[in-house]
Amino acid sequence: MALKLDKNLKMYYSIKEVAELIGVNESTLRYWETEFPSLKPKVSGPAKVRQYTEKDIEQIRLIHNLVKVRGFRLAAAKKILHNNRDGADKTADMIMRLTSVRNDLQTLKRQLDLLQ
């Protein structure tokens, strides 16, 4: 059996790590937890520390895409997630890929401009 080197070994992420990764405030993540029943991170200890899994982070990315990137209101985002989860997943994935390509092209353009 071959060893997968690209596999992430971390099981849980803190709310601070997730907020930085997604680009939102920690309070926004807490609010989304109250609005989206499917988003329930593990809570541990007397301090009630939130621990997010990769599945939670994917859910947050999808919510972020719908609310912050595409501009849907929370009610509309909930409806989309409830009625057409697969379509929302595919759209979010495509937008992430296109954004990545755009960033790569902008970097390449800046490098070419420096050569002239």
Image (cartoon, rainbow, N blue to C red):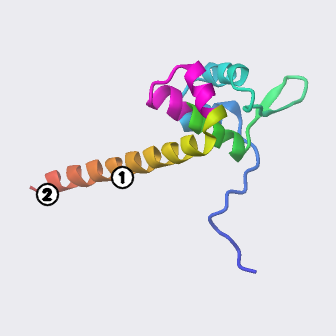
Q: Nearer the viewer, residue 107 or 101?
A: 101
The image quadrant of residue 74 is top right
Helix, strand, or loop for circle 2? helix
Q: Residue at x 67, y 62 (%)?
A: 7
Residue count near mark 1 (Cα–Cα under 10 Å), binned few <14, some 14–19, many ≥20: few
Q: Residue at x 72, y 57 (%)?
A: 9
Q: Nearer the viewer, residue 13 or 54?
A: 54
Q: Quadrant of the C terminus?
A: bottom left
Instruction: State the residue position of label 2.
Output: 115
Where is residue 93? Give x, y as percent: 51, 48
Magenta span dominant secondary structure? helix
Q: Which mark is residue 101?
A: 1
**Left or right, 64 with reference to 2:** left
The image quadrant of residue 58 is top right
Q: Nearer the viewer, residue 84 or 5?
A: 84
Where is residue 81? Give x, y as percent: 63, 34
**Left or right, 109 with reference to 77:** left
Residue extending farthest front: 83
Q: Residue at x 55, y 35 (%)?
A: 22
Tag 1: amino acid: Val
Q: Quadrant of the N terminus?
A: bottom right
Q: Is residue 23 above or below residue 92?
A: above
Q: Which residues are magenta?
A: 64-81
Helix, strand, or loop for circle 1? helix
Magenta run includes residue 101: no
Q: Residue at x 61, y 27 (%)?
A: 79
